[in-house]
Amino acid sequence: MENQLAKSTEERTFQYQDSLPSLPVPSLKESLKKYLESVKPFANEEEYRKTEEIVQKFQSGIGEKLHQKLLERAKGKRNWLEEWWLNVAYLDVRIPSQLNVNFAGPAAHFEHYWPPKEGTQLERGSIILWHNLNYWQLLRKEKVPVHKVGNTPLDMNQFRMLFSTCKVPGITRDSIMNYFRTESEGRSPNHIVVLCRGRAFVFDVIHEGCLVTPPELLRQLTYIHKKCHSEPDGPGIAALTSEERTRWAKAREYLIGLDAENLALLEKIQSSLLVYSMEDDSPHVTPEDYSEIIAAILIGDPTVRWGDKSYNLISFSNGVFGCNCDHAPFDAMVMVNISYYVDEKIFQNEGRWKGSEKVRDIPLPEELIFTVDEKVLSDISQAKAQYLREASDLQIAAYAFTSFGKKLTKNKMLHPDTFIQLALQLAYYRLHGRPGCCYETAMTRYFYHGRTETMRSCTVEAVRWCQSMQDPSVSPHERQQKMLQAFAKHNKMMKDCSAGKGFDRHLLGLLLIAKEEGLPVPELFTDPLFSKSGGGGNFVLSTSLVGYLRVQGVVVPMVHNGYGFFYHIRDDRLS
């Protein structure tokens, strides 16, 4: 009885899902006021006056009608944005998503027990895989702790999308297949897929009811590695996932038409827990310089990662690791969470496996051999060429700033995230001589299935401060006053966004209602200042705080002439 009571009081990962508040629709007046404020840094007086008129006309006219329709829609849904956001931000997008949408990051193990070292890829790989599989089991048992702010639980739905999830390409819209189930919900797939030198292998990670151990995983990985290094490379079907979405959808249809068995193999990959990638490269990495490892993970070999998979765990020849994930099903904080869990476990165990070396008689991995023809091979080489051409246009710099970290900023009563955001504004202003429209991710997980809101950090206050920093006649005291005003503004906006009072997603909702009703696009959205200030995904600075842990991650810039700026903050450094 006591055991039962202890069990029943233990919080379950998904237990608060049904009691989370619905995502609110902000007030139209407030949203438009905030929008007008956000465009100010990018307009001269005349442009601003014109936009002001457009906004007033919108507010008293079509905007009010659309807002009422949005309120109607919200009545019937716990999250009025969810389906729209998934489609508009991810599933309808036709550009290649592996490069343009996925997020990626290096594992931090090289900072402690696992410095780069040739000959360690397989043994370390078996340990890192095992810790990931333990996390999968915790999630299935709903033992991953509920995220909270104070005592308020946050939405945990995205954690369902970490394992056994895959995007499937469509001609005009992709879809997400999620095969994960908790133990109480039923059976969940228990196989992983390993990609190596253009070939794909599969094996189960549960044997006779028990999770396979690192020595057993090592045997499976060694078998695959030896086979791939002593036989010719495979066709590299995975490269097709890096292609433009409609092209990949057509190539996939052709592949299935060629042989029905190809569909069964694709489904095996889609439903797998995760994809484990074996790379031959040995990227350079030090705790002060992540540039090469991030490049290798973000734009590495397209034949050994499944771009549509929610989790590609990537291993390199020198025993360094990372991940590459489709962004559609979840946001990076899920990955940060599991990466931190795994890193802590490796750290606690000094990078070693301390259990039994015994290896049970487990079936060897099975190869997934696709039926291909000249057309498929030509599609693959075209996909690779397209991918490498686009990837070559990306410049990556990832250094650690070690003069100070959050200890000092907090000591000065300054929020560390706002500190970096304002420093970024100043850097852009100094470099380009003008303000840079900036997207920072705000989270809305206080609400049912909440994901993100746009926080526009290029405020009037930030620009005034940047100007004062560049003007030698302004005193340090005055600069400090302007800086503190910019801090206060940023902090308030971030709080508003997290509380469901941002405006970008609201405006998107109004635009989508107009489209669904077959109405013309309101002038608000065609006004040049809308995109000049970043609207419609035109932010020159695309930024996000990855957290306060050892975990780092990146996404490519939002626009061609832009920057992607992703950072994590520690006590003594900023990366």
Image: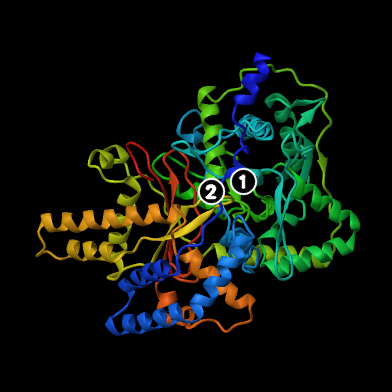
Residue type of the residue flagged with mark 1: Asn
Dividing the picture into quadrants, the one containing residue 245 is bottom right
Above or below, 484 against 219 in this view is: below
Q: CA distance from mark 1 to mark 2?
A: 13 Å
Is any part of residue 39 visible from this angle?
Answer: yes
Q: Earlier in the sequence, mark 1 or mark 2?
A: 1
Decide which of 266, 65 is in the foreground and name it: 65
Dividing the picture into quadrants, the one containing residue 472 is bottom left
Residue type of the residue flagged with mark 2: Ala
Decide which of 255, 443 is in the foreground and name it: 443
Rate crowding at label 1 as few (under 14), some (14 to 19) or many (20 or more) other CA atoms within 10 Å: some
Above or below, 32 against 77 in this view is: below
The mark total stands at 2
Residue of label 1: 157
The residue at 77%/55% (across/down) is 235
Is any part of residue 279 visible from this angle?
Answer: no
The residue at 54%/71% (across/down) is 68
Please tell me whether mark 2 sits on a helix, a strand or a loop: helix
Q: Please identify the quadrant where the C terminus is shown.
A: top left
Decide which of 493, 464 is in the foreground and name it: 493
Point out residue 191 in the picture as x, y percentages from the top left corner.
Answer: 77, 38
Q: Please identify the quadrant where the N terminus is shown.
A: top right
Residue of label 2: 332
Q: Is residue 191 left or right of residue 553?
A: right
Point out residue 308 in the picture as x, y percentages from the top left corner.
Answer: 67, 55
